[in-house]
Image (cartoon, helix red, strand yellow):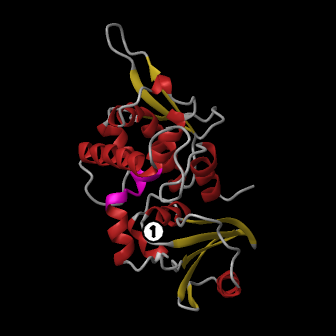
Amino acid sequence: MLPAEAEVYYTYVHLNRITFPGQSGRWTVFPGMTCEEISAGLDAVVMQVLEQAGIYEPPVDAFVLARSLRITVAEDERQQGRARYVRLGGRRGRSMRATVLLRPEPRIERRHWALAHEIGEHVAHRVFARLGTDPRETSPMAREAVASQMAGRLLVPTAWFGPDALAAGWDLLALKSRYASASHELIARRMLEVPVPAIITVFDQGQLYFRRSNVPGRVPAPSSAEVRCWQRVHDRGRPERAADGLRTIQAWPVHEEGWKREILRTEVELEPAG
């Protein structure tokens, strides 16, 4: 079993099958559009939704967002998925009401993520309209892709996160304190969407689980300096900072009973052009 945070973000990374912003290539569900164009459209809708809810700084409460959008939220212990977006019929003469059915979850980050994802589903039409795209002419996965991307951006909005990450010196724990409704891993992966070259690495139970960069090209295997830094964090359970030549490595423990996760951020040096 993956830990709670891994399960939450597995949907974001793998289910949508789209290229991450900041990487080379185009988003497969929106052929003909660049990552930058689609990211800008997503972020514009995010800020629109946040403003509508009267939220102007983190942390973002997905339940407040739902209320502002007149979405009813109810728990449903019987459903298999974490959340489900439906429209329920009202009383005679009343229109259908948007409703999100949430499976009870003990971890608050899971609940916020699940609800944010369904809110993304609810406002997906705004994204398509912003991009001038007819959803009927896109991939069947397009709406799911938009919902997944919106979830991460709603909880960790691009416009706020970039300046906050720079001001915090990329300190994951400080950023987690500020973006409390988002998981550590979501925050770390959102670092890749800030235009500062870096590699994010995640170890679970002593095994490499995820490693990705926002620089085009093949991501190198962890260096010996990265491995040593990770091992110290794994063993000691406290943040570490190390140097790998001119690069800085930062590593943080996300340990809970029965599970050890470590997250690393490594600076990337870009070779001069030409």
User: Is residue 86 shown to the viewer in this render?
Assistant: yes
- The three-letter code of the residue at mark 1 reads Lys
User: Is residue 75 shown to the viewer in this render?
Assistant: no
Q: Quadrant of residue 104?
A: top right
Q: Position of residue 161 (x, y in %)?
A: 37, 64
Q: Position of residue 44 (x, y in %)?
A: 31, 46
Identify the residue at horizontal 53%, vertical 62% (top origin).
189
Seen from the viewer's position, the closer of residues 152 and 86 is 152
Q: Quadrant of the N terminus?
A: bottom right
Q: Position of residue 113 (x, y in %)?
A: 50, 49
Identify the residue at horizontal 72%, vertical 69% (top origin).
208
Identify the residue at horizontal 42%, vertical 67% (top origin).
195
Task: State the residue position of label 1.
Answer: 176
Q: Tell me, yes or no, whether the highlighted magenta stretch contains residue 154.
A: yes
Q: Quadrant of residue 2?
A: bottom right
Seen from the viewer's position, the closer of residues 133 and 165 is 133
Q: Position of residue 244 (x, y in %)?
A: 60, 89
Considering the numbered disc 1 on the image, is that residue within a helix, a strand or a loop?
A: helix
Label 1 crowding class (10 Å Cα cut-off): few <14, some 14-19, many 20+? Answer: some
Q: Magenta stretch?
A: 152-159
